[in-house]
């Protein structure tokens, strides 16, 4: 018995899209809604929790920036460059790129703006959630 593996670039792009999306959207939601509340509930010192989340949030936002760039590239390859301006996925990815850049710039130059950093982080998380609800580029009738 021989099995042949066929190269399907659309399927590879869809898999890369899903992997990138899982990494950054799942990471943002996991940190903010599960890890930080769990650390708080087990009785760690609030200053320690704030230090941990203050260290991990910029790393996750940088990961989100890189993954969103990859997703934008995959969207342009699958749907064309015009899809960035005409498609909801393109709009959301451009919003994520802008939010991530603003977050990182604020974190570097104005780290005392806690309220803005948290608000921006939540906007990123909800933009990711909206992106998850959109179809995968060029997945068509293919099954996962």
Image: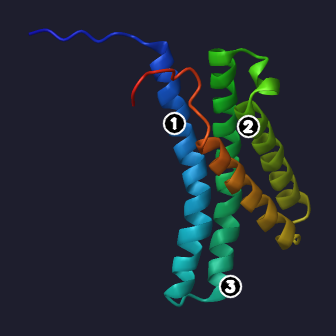
Which one is in front, 111 or 122?
122
Task: Check contact, mark 3 vs mark 1: CB within 8 A.
Answer: no
Which one is in front, 41 or 106?
41
Residue 67 versus residue 103 in the image, above or below: above
User: Along the horizontal axis of the image, is 140 left or right of 115?
Assistant: left
Residue 93, label in figure: 2
Give SS at disc 3.
Answer: helix
Task: Check contact, mark 2 vs mark 3: CB within 8 A.
Answer: no
What's the CA distance linking mark 3 and mark 1? Answer: 35 Å
- Furthest toward the right, the residue is 110
Residue occupying the point 74% across, 34% down: 88
Residue 75 versus residue 48 in the image, above or below: above
Task: Check contact, mark 1 vs mark 2: CB within 8 A.
Answer: no
Residue occupying the point 69% across, 29% down: 72
Q: Residues within 10 Å of mark 3 (few under 14, many from 20)?
A: few
In the rendered image, residue 90, in percent from the top left (x then y), is placed at: 74, 31
Q: Nearer the viewer, mark 2 or mark 3?
A: 2
Q: Which residue is mark 3?
A: 47
In the rendered image, residue 14, in percent from the top left (x then y), is placed at: 51, 26
Name the image quarter holding residue 68: top right
Residue 18, label in figure: 1
What's the CA distance linking mark 1 and mark 2? Answer: 14 Å
Which one is in front, 126 or 62?
126
- Furthest toward the left, the residue is 1
User: Along the horizontal axis of the image, is 87 left or right of 39?
Assistant: right
User: Where, quadrant-wise, is the N terminus in this rendering?
Assistant: top left
In the rendered image, residue 33, in percent from the top left (x then y), is placed at: 59, 69
Residue 101 versus residue 81 in the image, above or below: below
User: Where, quadrant-wise, is the C terminus in this rendering?
Assistant: top left
């Amino acid at each position: 018995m021989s099995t042949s593996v066929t190269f399907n670039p659309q399927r590879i792009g869809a898999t890369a899209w899903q992997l990138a999306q899982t990494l950054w959207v799942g990471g943002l939601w996991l940190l903010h809604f599960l890890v930080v509340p769990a650390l708080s509930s087990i009785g760690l010192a609030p200053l320690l929790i704030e230090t941990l989340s203050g260290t991990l949030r910029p790393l996750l936002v940088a990961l989100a920036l890189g993954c969103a760039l990859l997703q934008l590239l995959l969207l342009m390859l699958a749907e064309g460059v015009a899809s960035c301006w005409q498609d909801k996925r393109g709009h959301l990815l451009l919003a994520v790129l802008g939010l991530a850049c603003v977050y990182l710039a604020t974190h570097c130059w104005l780290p005392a703006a806690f309220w803005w950093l948290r608000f921006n982080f939540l906007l990123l998380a909800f933009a990711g959630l909206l992106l998850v609800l959109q179809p995968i580029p060029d997945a068509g009738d293919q099954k996962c």
